[in-house]
Image: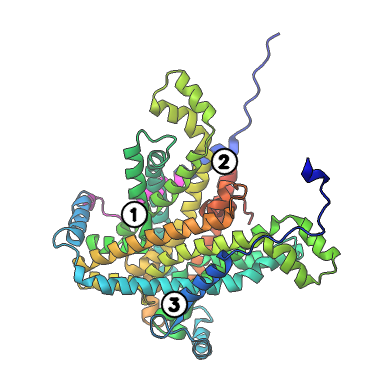
Amino acid sequence: MTAATAPRSARPSRPPRSLVGPLALLVFAAITWWAASEEYGLNFDVPRLFSNLTRGAGILAEFWPPDFSVLPRTVAPLLETIQMAVIASVIGCAVALPVAFLASRVTSPNTLAYLLDRGILSVVRALPDVLYALIFVAALSIGPLPGILALILFNISVVAKLLSETVDGVDHGPIEAARATGANRLLTVRWAVLPQVLPNYVAYSLYAFELNVRASAVLGIVGAGGIGNLINETRRFFQYDKLMVVVLEILILVIIIEWVSIWLRRKLV
Amino acid sequence: MTASRPVRPAQRTKHIATALVVLVVAAAAFTVDVKIERLPDLPGALVRIFGRMFLEPAPEWSYLPEAFGSMMESIQIAWLGTIIGAVLSLPLGFFGAKNITSRLVSNIIRQLLNVIRAIPEILVAVVVFIPMVGLGAYPGMLAIGVHSIGTLGKLSAEVIEGIDPGPVEAARAAGGRPVQIQRWGVLPQVLPEIVAFWLYRFEINIRASAILGAVGAGGVGEALVQSLVFRRYDRAGMVVIVVIVVTILIDTASGWLRRRIIQGGGGAPHGADREQPELAEANAAAVQRP
């Protein structure tokens, strides 16, 4: 018990200085210089930026007042946006369920399926939804179908990733209990794992739906259906007062969907 | 006397909610303007385009430097945009935390952040910054910066609300001025988690900046649009490969770094929430009140 009887030193000794902090700052500075430099990067220049912004501020005045005469024309595309989000959410979240179970070590039948599923999932995740939409528009021509397909892929990647991580953390007790009764793998997943993660699954699906409404509003910009078409049209002809109406509608839609989703989450989970 | 079963809790609203969901889904499915007769061609069309992108002809390797260069531009846009968002969101995070400012101020800031979050960055670019500063990388960077303020501010405020009040009281007891209390009592507690969120946002913003090229805001999206417009599917294939490989590499590096930052040098392991900002974001959305 020497430690207890030894006289207390006045101050605890300073921990040795770590090089990690300064090194991280150096790396940060280097990347920022690379990104902002004239030679290798975007030629980021604060004074020029501010002169650009102040010069451009006049254009923003053209957005006001909004020209509500465009309103009747926005109804059908807005409905299409919601339809795309709903359909893509249902299909995407349904597919994501088995994909998530394959992507967790707890429920995956074997290592090969696990690794394969995770690999495909990370490749699908790496490409953003609008790039999928671009490719699908090239393949299927314009309309809501390529947009729905792009959103489905997006939903699978988001929900499957979140859910597989939740499955990783489930309580193993029910699984052992199910195995002890002689349940096979599918039955174990159905009765021991699914009930544990179902509330999360519903929450993630609603979260994905919210993201979908936002995404489907812009997919039309690349020709994939919905209200985005109108964004493209109005901005091409510099009808900023009409564009403002579309933007306001999207904003209101997104906020309403968020409320609905929060209400549903409270009722369903 | 037999023990009666516990009464099943009333589930009326749950049934109503479920019925509502089913109704909306059915309505959407039956009214959407997708030509059903074209659905059977769908797999063929997809196989055809992916074949042209990756197999016949093979991706054009001579296009690799150009595709890689535009991907680098996307990364630069994302990096600077994230810095803009981080710098502007940190003070907003403090003002949006109930335990730092009053309930009224924090509510106002939170609502402001919610509105910012609701507007997709591509819309910010199209509506605000492309008209203001013209096409190119600048509007993309600014749009990403502005949109990032929304999520980063909200997550920062939540982290700040979860601090241990001890160090704040100690700083106050030592006679610290308000700014000093924030600097020494709050910031050291929340910085690791907030920096992890910044890194995570950078990962998200790479995808966002890849998208922004589709509206003329620079980066790899523009390369993909150009390839597809000119039906150079071999080039499009190359672009897709570059995007996927670089994104996965950066995600992996950034994810490793985030885990290091959160866990520190062998500190106590935290919950999954802290390691997974995406999970935190989804769960935070779950408890958010309008």
Compared across the picture, whether B191 is left or right of A30 comes to right
Question: Between marks 3 and 2, how big is the CA–CA gap?
Answer: 45 Å
Q: Quarter holding the N terminus of chain A?
A: top right
Q: Mark 2 points at which residue?
A: A269
Q: Which three-letter amino acid code belongs to the residue tagged 1?
A: Val
Q: The residue under label 2 is which amino acid type? A: Val
Q: Residue at x 74, y 63 (%)?
A: B185
SS for dot 1: helix
Query: What's the distance in space between the residues labelled 3 and 1, CA to CA?
Result: 26 Å
Q: Is mark 3 on a helix, strand or loop?
A: helix
**Residue A88 screen position, x and y as percent:** 38, 51
Side of B187 relative to B177 (left or right): left
Give the labeled residue for mark 1.
A123
Alpha-carbon span between mark 2 and mark 1: 31 Å
Q: Mark 3 points at which residue?
A: A35
For the residues bearing labels 3 and 2, Cβ distance under 8 angstroms: no
- Check the image and name the residue furthest to the top: B1
